[in-house]
Image (spheres, rainbow, N blue to C red):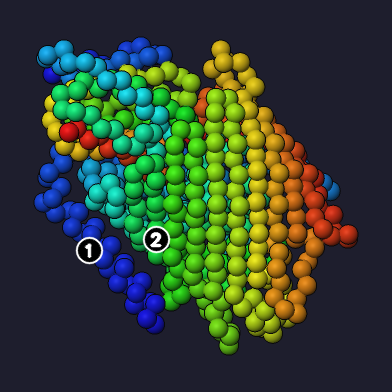
């Protein structure tokens, strides 16, 4: 209850700040009248063709995203992102998804301290906050940013952000926690995201990121720490605490780019959670107490400097183990102790349009269940 | 004080303020990339004529110095440089913001111009 009050107080402070933004202080910064009151529209789309071993070839309009922004003033901004996944949403069917991925208000107070409230992206890793298709190599997002850091990870919350000088910036939010009944052996905490939909905020979380930029280097350290409730499910165990830590870096020099990320998830009380969920559903979810993932990628532009079109080739190695450490009495499922080599190319007829192709050779530690290879092609564009 | 709209495709020049006393020009190269300007803090003396050379590492961005007439587009990666000249006639801290939607962190894409 006290944690709920804490969350309510923080949200109250954020709302007070936003109300203050509408006051006379704004008059000190004359606004550009040509921008006020004119919402902006942008977006991105991803069309994929996937051929997985022993599966039929599939095409998928994976993401269709529209972003709407609006400046109420130079200090008060709105940004939103609405996404349709897999092109089709039908009532009661397991097909696509319509989701609000972002919808927040920014109050610009000072370079070092600004306020944000609404539906926000959890600031963990590279791709969760920076996922426009032309910004990354490969048709699909990285495995690490899929099953370790569950992109696109977002929730309602409030927090602060700013620049500290010397190339350092930060973001820190208070958010609702996770729903532990959605945790799984193969995708970790991904099914536990509440995504701002009547989210249970009685187990709040804090998340933050410190980022450093200089020259061609961008590096970041991020964390998420909070509780995880059980939604509408009644379980007679303590709610598990969850921690996520991540380190990442990107470095670009000339036509070459390196990037890498290391991410870890810890789940307290995973043994109790497994037992309670098994008692209720009859199925042991085999949730691990630690998940670990990392990747390293090298890319280079191979097209001549004289070309305005660009061709980039890349190679990436990933390890993503969602059964890295098991609670006492549970054995890891070796098929989820995985790695992958991804090689491919991206053709940019325009910096905002990417034609992608890659081959994925995945492996796991199972002697029975073999990881499938995969060939992917896709188009991603931003406008 | 006068403005000239940019015309060249590869290199757009926009003179926003002209120094009356032919003060030396300080060239400041600024790189824009989702969702930051680099450098994010620019410090000059009052009266300096700043020639901003603006390039992007990804999509097109905007470069707007709030409270001044400077508001120009930065072309996409390897599509040219925008040059804009501004005379820092007034001391203070000026916020520079991206004025062209560029993605999930667009609203926070800012830098600071400090005129001493």
Residue at which label 1 appears:
A16
| Residue A17 shows up from this direction | yes
Residue nearest the observer in this picture, A24 or A280: A24
Percent position (x, y) of residue B47? Answer: 15, 23
Residue nearest the observer in this picture, A38 or A231: A231
Determine which quarter of the picture holds residue A376: top right
Image quarter where the C terminus of chain B lies is: top left
Who's the residue at 62% across and 58% down the image? A148
Q: Earlier in the sequence, mark 1 or mark 2?
A: 1
Percent position (x, y) of residue A221? Answer: 50, 53
Image quarter where the N terminus of chain B lies is: top left
**How many marks overall?**
2
Residue A173 numbered mark, or none: 2
Q: Chain of mark 1?
A: A
SS of the residue under disc 2? strand
A288 relative to B11, above or below: below
A179 relative to A127, above or below: below
Q: Chain of mark 2?
A: A
SS of the residue under disc 1? helix
Q: Is residue B59 left or right of residue B74?
A: right
| Residue A57 shows up from this direction | no
Who's the residue at 75% across and 60% down the image? A336
């Amino acid at each position: 209850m006290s944690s709920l009050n804490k969350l309510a107080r923080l949200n109250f402070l954020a709302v007070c700040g936003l109300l203050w933004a509408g006051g006379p202080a704004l008059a000190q910064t004359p606004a550009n009248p040509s921008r006020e009151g004119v919402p902006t529209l942008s977006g991105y789309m991803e069309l994929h063709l996937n051929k997985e071993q022993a599966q039929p070839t599939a095409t998928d309009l994976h993401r269709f995203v529209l972003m709407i922004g609006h400046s109420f003033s130079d200090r008060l901004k709105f940004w939103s992102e609405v996404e349709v996944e897999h092109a089709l949403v039908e009532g009661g069917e397991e097909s696509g998804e319509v989701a609000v991925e972002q919808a927040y208000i920014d109050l610009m107070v000072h370079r070092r301290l600004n306020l944000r409230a609404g539906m926000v992206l959890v600031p963990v890793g590279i791709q969760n906050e920076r996922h426009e298709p032309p910004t990354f190599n490969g048709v699909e997002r990285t495995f690490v940013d899929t099953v370790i850091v569950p992109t696109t990870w977002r929730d309602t919350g409030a927090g602060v952000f700013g620049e500290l000088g010397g190339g350092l910036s930060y973001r820190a939010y208070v958010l609702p926690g996770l729903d532990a009944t959605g945790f799984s052996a193969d995708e970790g905490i991904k099914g536990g995201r509440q995504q701002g939909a009547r989210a249970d905020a009685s187990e709040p979380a804090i998340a933050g990121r410190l980022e450093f930029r200089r020259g061609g280097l961008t590096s970041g350290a991020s964390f998420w720490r909070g509780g995880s409730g059980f939604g509408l499910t009644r379980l007679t165990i303590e709610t598990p605490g969850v921690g996520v830590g991540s380190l990442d870096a990107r470095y670009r020099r000339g036509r070459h780019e390196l990037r890498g990320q290391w991410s870890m998830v810890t789940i307290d009380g995973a043994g109790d959670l497994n037992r309670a969920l098994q008692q209720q559903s009859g199925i042991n979810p085999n949730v691990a107490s630690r998940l670990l993932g990392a990747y390293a990628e090298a890319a280079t532009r191979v097209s001549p400097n004289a070309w305005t079109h660009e061709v980039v080739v890349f190679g990436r190695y990933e390890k993503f183990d969602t059964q890295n450490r098991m609670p006492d009495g549970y054995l890891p499922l070796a098929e989820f102790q995985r790695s992958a080599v991804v090689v491919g190319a991206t053709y940019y007829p325009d910096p905002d349009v990417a034609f992608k192709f890659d081959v994925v050779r995945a492996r796991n530690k199972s002697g029975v269940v073999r990881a499938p290879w995969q060939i992917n092609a896709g188009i991603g564009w931003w406008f | 004080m006068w403005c000239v709209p940019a015309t060249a495709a590869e290199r757009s020049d926009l003179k926003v303020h002209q120094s009356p006393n032919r003060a030396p020009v300080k060239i400041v190269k600024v790189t824009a990339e989702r969702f930051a300007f680099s450098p994010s803090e620019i410090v000059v003396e009052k009266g300096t004529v700043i020639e901003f050379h603006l390039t992007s590492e990804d999509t097109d961005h905007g470069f707007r110095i709030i409270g001044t007439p400077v508001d120009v587009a930065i072309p996409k990666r390897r599509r040219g440089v925008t040059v804009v000249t501004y005379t820092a006639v007034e001391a203070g801290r000026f916020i520079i913001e991206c004025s062209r939607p560029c993605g999930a962190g667009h609203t926070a894409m800012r830098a600071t111009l400090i005129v001493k």
